[in-house]
């Protein structure tokens, strides 16, 4: 009886008439970027204030899909998932002198006891401190841990929807190594994993050389997607995909690419991820040492690797939209199919749609069923295009007469008539 109730609860939740978060006819007037306009209009997010967004059921489903891709690729390279606190004591950050360095963007305050606390902008300090209890010997290394957790930054330029926020999700992976050689080995592995993530989410990106800041003289690497909504500028070559952030590049637009015979171009871009060699700054500050095979104490060498799932979501929308709405790639679509019942006086249409809906669920197909009685066919189609689910299935008097279902891929201009068995096969295997 329990499983029956859970099953029917899932069915009820996926009916559009009961979905929390409604589509809006007009785009928010204070937004410029496509992701901010379309995600709010589509009922994916609610803007509480600049840089702070609430994720509604549709938006959270997309976020869950993105995080699933990230987790699969992080687990595949040996990452262990954990979850750290956002509340951070001042003394932890003073050990690396970053309490003062970060005060312009870190939310810092006193609790009722008078203790000074900050909301985490990142977690290098925390992981170095925690790892000091687990890493004692070279036999404990290498070690890779990651989390998907909320970060807080008092961004003075919070704008462009989910691209730059004050409260946002971050996937941060930290690696711990005995020597530079092992860090370099894993760095390449992490790079390949990142490229797999962005390819699975159907993003065209450039692995871009960037500044190492105060941590390393070597280049770090960013993953940049060309977009007018971006805040970065990169020089890139379309022929060999070589790219550099303008902050470190000595090249100019139109010059010959140093890696091939192509020419460098200049473009605006969104940074969707980065990988970074940290060295020993954080391990030395938090006494994170290990004993080598001769018993000598040495500082652990660290790396960090970040992806913003919310920024990824925004970038997908910026890259995949048309005049009607969002066009979600298959790995990020909130539902596999959007079932639309065209209103009819004939009860057969509703009965058939209800039956098809249950069959799809029974086959494991995630489906949003537009059962709304107060919407015309045109309004339903418009909402379907705005929401952007991968497959649209239409049931009407005409389709029932022909014993078919009208099927349309969101990124296609044409629809097809298919028998139900073929529809189920396509949705399960396409």
Image (spheres, grey):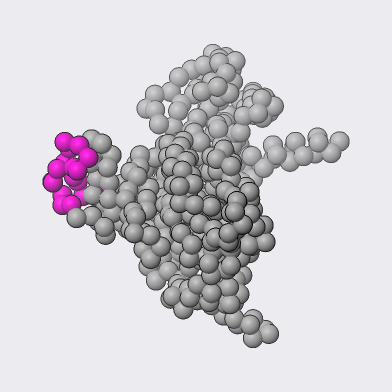
Residue in front for this viewpoint, 33 or 341: 33
* Residue lying farthest to the bottom in this orientation: 114
Q: Classify 393 as above or below 26.
A: above
Q: Is residue 312 visible?
A: no
Q: Position of residue 118 (x, y in %)?
A: 56, 74
Label total for image? 0
Main SS of residues in magenta: loop
Q: Classify 273 as above or below 92.
A: above
* Residue lying farthest to the right in this orientation: 1
Q: Classify 389 as above or below 24.
A: above
Q: Is residue 362 visible?
A: yes
The quarter of the displayed image where residue 334 is located: top right
Q: Position of residue 153 (x, y in %)?
A: 48, 68
Quadrant of the image for the N terminus?
A: top right
What span is in magenta?
Answer: 251-271
Residue in front for this viewpoint, 323 or 260: 260
* Residue lying farthest to the front in this orientation: 294
Residue in the picture at 46% in, 26% down: 408
Residue in the picture at 46% in, 43% down: 185
Q: Is residue 243 left or right of residue 299?
A: left
Within the magenta stretch, is there residue 255?
A: yes
Residue in the picture at 38% in, 60% down: 216
Q: Position of residue 4 (x, y in %)?
A: 81, 35
Within the magenta stretch, is there residue 88?
A: no
Residue in the picture at 51% in, 23% down: 430
Residue in front for this viewpoint, 346 or 386: 386
């Amino acid at each position: 009886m329990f499983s029956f109730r859970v099953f029917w609860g899932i069915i009820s939740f996926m009916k559009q008439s009961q979905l929390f978060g409604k589509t809006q006819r007009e785009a928010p007037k204070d937004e410029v970027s496509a992701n901010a306009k379309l995600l709010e209009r589509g009922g994916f997010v609610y803007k509480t204030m600049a840089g702070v967004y609430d994720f509604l059921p549709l938006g959270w489903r997309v976020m869950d899909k993105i995080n699933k891709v990230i987790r699969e690729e992080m687990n595949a390279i040996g990452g262990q998932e954990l979850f750290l606190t956002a509340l951070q004591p001042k003394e932890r950050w003073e050990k690396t002198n970053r309490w003062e360095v970060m005060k312009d963007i870190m939310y810092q305050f006193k609790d009722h006891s008078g203790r000074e606390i900050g909301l985490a902008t990142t977690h290098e300090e925390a992981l170095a401190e925690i790892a000091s209890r687990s890493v004692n010997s070279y036999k404990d290394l290498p070690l890779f841990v990651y989390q998907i957790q909320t970060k807080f930054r008092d961004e003075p330029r919070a704008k462009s929807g989910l691209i730059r926020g004050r409260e946002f999700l971050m996937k941060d992976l930290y690696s711990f190594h005995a020597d530079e050689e092992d860090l370099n080995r894993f760095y390449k592995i992490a790079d390949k994993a990142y490229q797999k993530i962005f390819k699975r989410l159907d993003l065209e990106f450039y692995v871009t050389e960037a500044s190492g800041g105060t941590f390393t003289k070597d280049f770090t690497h960013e993953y940049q997607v060309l977009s007018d909504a971006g805040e970065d500028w990169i020089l890139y070559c379309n022929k060999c995909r070589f790219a550099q952030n303008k902050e470190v590049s000595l090249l100019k637009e139109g010059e010959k690419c140093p890696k091939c015979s192509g020419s460098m171009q200049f473009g605006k871009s969104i940074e969707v991820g980065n990988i970074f060699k940290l060295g020993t700054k954080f391990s030395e500050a938090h006494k994170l040492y290990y004993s080598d095979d001769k018993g000598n104490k040495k500082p652990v060498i660290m790396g960090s690797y970040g992806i913003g799932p919310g920024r990824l979501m925004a970038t997908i929308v910026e890259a995949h939209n048309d005049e009607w709405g969002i066009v979600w790639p298959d790995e990020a679509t909130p539902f596999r199919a959007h079932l639309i019942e065209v209103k009819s006086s004939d009860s057969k249409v509703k009965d058939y749609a209800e039956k098809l809906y249950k069959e799809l669920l029974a086959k494991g197909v995630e489906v949003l069923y537009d059962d709304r009685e107060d919407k015309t066919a045109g309004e339903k189609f418009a909402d379907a295009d705005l929401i952007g689910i991968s497959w649209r299935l239409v049931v009407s008097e005409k389709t029932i007469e022909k014993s078919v279902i009208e099927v349309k891929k969101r990124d296609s201009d044409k629809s097809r008539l298919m028998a139900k068995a073929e529809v189920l096969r396509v949705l399960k295997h396409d």
